[in-house]
Image (spheres, rainbow, N blue to C red):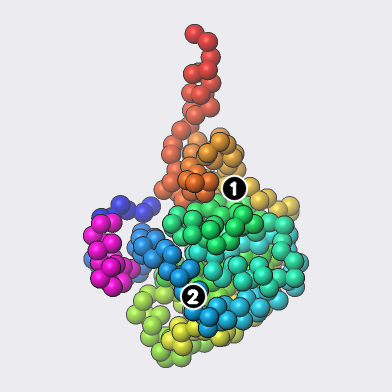
């Protein structure tokens, strides 16, 4: 669960150019980046990834990267596509433009509501956007044909096995990872990953779960000291796909209601803000007798 932090002080540090994740890790004497530090850091940066698209060279790089991923997606002919940790949608949109056909269902989430709202402005209404944590994805097992990440696992060093397990849980046919590569990277890349406590050992985490790597190679990277590795894992689909939201706490299906999502099984309510479902575990409001309470109010006395 995320801890409440003095955001006023963090904003001040952010405007001074302080690396917020580094600051919070040091302040808490942590040896890894916890989810609270990641959330606050990226939420404060919301909008900066859209601004980066003012650089035509960066846009051209994103387009070249998207063409590579589009081939991997098109080969599966998916009915559903999922961008985990979408940020502001700046990698998802060029991918959608490069696909031979857009899957009927396209979903994406980020840990930060601010970034998801920027993503909605950028992507339009073609993508089902929501707030969630990649360690507690609110979807059913084997629910999405193709799952992709673009440096979304990156800051979660030390939680590689948990993240890979969760990504493979919701993947139905193909998982495509584009994450910093400690295994294939230069000494400069390795040093940066160590210093920033980024993920490493993703291939080993995949193999430990009984899966093999269909592809594992370096991609063109925007920063030479932050080299991106491409990892592709294929799965045999099992059962029918279930695209409903599920409780990130119990895994039970959520009912979509007027302005919120509710699990009649675990009794948790998850709100929507400006139409965006907020499905982090810490967004939950306990209301085990919600329906009974509503019915009792309507009943005549």
First reached walking from the N terminus: tag 1 or tag 2: 2
Residue that appears at 45% across and 70% down? 51
Name the outermost residue toward the bottom: 187
Res. 281 visible in picture: yes
Q: Element under label 2?
A: helix
Q: Is residue 301 left or right of residue 10?
A: right
Q: Element under label 1?
A: loop
Residue that appears at 55% across and 78% down? 59
Residue that appears at 52% across and 39% down? 260
Q: Is residue 140 left or right of residue 162?
A: right
Looking at the rendering, which quadrant does residue 208 occupy?
Answer: bottom right
The residue range painted magenta reads 7-24
Q: State the residue position of label 1.
A: 245
The dot on residue 50 is none
- On whether residue 222 falls in the magenta region, the answer is no
Q: CA distance from mark 1 to mark 2?
A: 35 Å
- On whether residue 10 falls in the magenta region, the answer is yes
In the rendering, at what x and y percent does residue 156 appear? 43, 68
In the rendering, at what x and y percent does residue 234 appear? 68, 71
Circle 1 Cα neighbour tier, 10 Å, few/some/many (<14 / 14–19 / ≥20): many
Is the residue 233 above or below the residue 268 in the image? below
The dot on residue 54 is 2
Main SS of residues in magenta: helix
Question: Which callout, 1 or 2, points to the residue nearer the camera?
Answer: 2
């Amino acid at each position: 669960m995320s801890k409440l932090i003095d955001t006023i002080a963090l904003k001040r540090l952010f405007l001074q150019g302080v690396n917020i994740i580094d600051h919070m890790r040091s302040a808490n004497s942590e040896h890894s980046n916890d989810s609270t530090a990641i959330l606050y850091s990226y939420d404060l940066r919301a909008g900066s990834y859209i601004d980066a698209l003012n650089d035509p060279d960066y846009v051209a790089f994103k387009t070249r990267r998207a063409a590579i991923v589009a081939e991997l997606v098109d080969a599966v002919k998916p009915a559903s596509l999922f961008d985990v940790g979408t940020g502001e949608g700046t990698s998802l949109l060029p991918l959608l433009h490069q696909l031979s056909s857009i899957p009927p269902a396209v979903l994406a989430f980020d840990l930060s509501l601010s970034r998801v709202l920027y993503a909605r402005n950028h992507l339009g209404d073609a993508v089902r956007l929501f707030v969630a944590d990649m360690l507690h994805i609110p979807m059913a097992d084997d629910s999405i044909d193709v799952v992709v990440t673009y440096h979304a696992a990156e800051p979660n060093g030390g939680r590689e096995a948990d993240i890979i397990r969760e990504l493979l849980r919701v993947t139905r046919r193909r998982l495509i990872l584009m994450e910093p590569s400690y295994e294939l990277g230069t000494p400069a890349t390795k040093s940066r990953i160590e210093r920033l406590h980024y993920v490493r050992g993703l291939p080993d985490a995949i193999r430990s779960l009984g899966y093999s790597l269909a592809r594992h190679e370096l991609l063109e990277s925007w920063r030479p000291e932050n080299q991106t590795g491409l990892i592709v894992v294929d799965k045999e689909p099992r059962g029918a796909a279930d695209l409903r939201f599920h409780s990130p706490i119990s895994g039970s299906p959520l009912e979509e209601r007027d302005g919120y999502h509710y699990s009649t099984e675990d009794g948790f309510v998850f709100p929507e803000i400006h139409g965006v479902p907020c499905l982090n575990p810490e967004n939950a409001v306990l209301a085990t007798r919600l329906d009974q309470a509503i019915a009792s109010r309507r009943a005549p006395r």
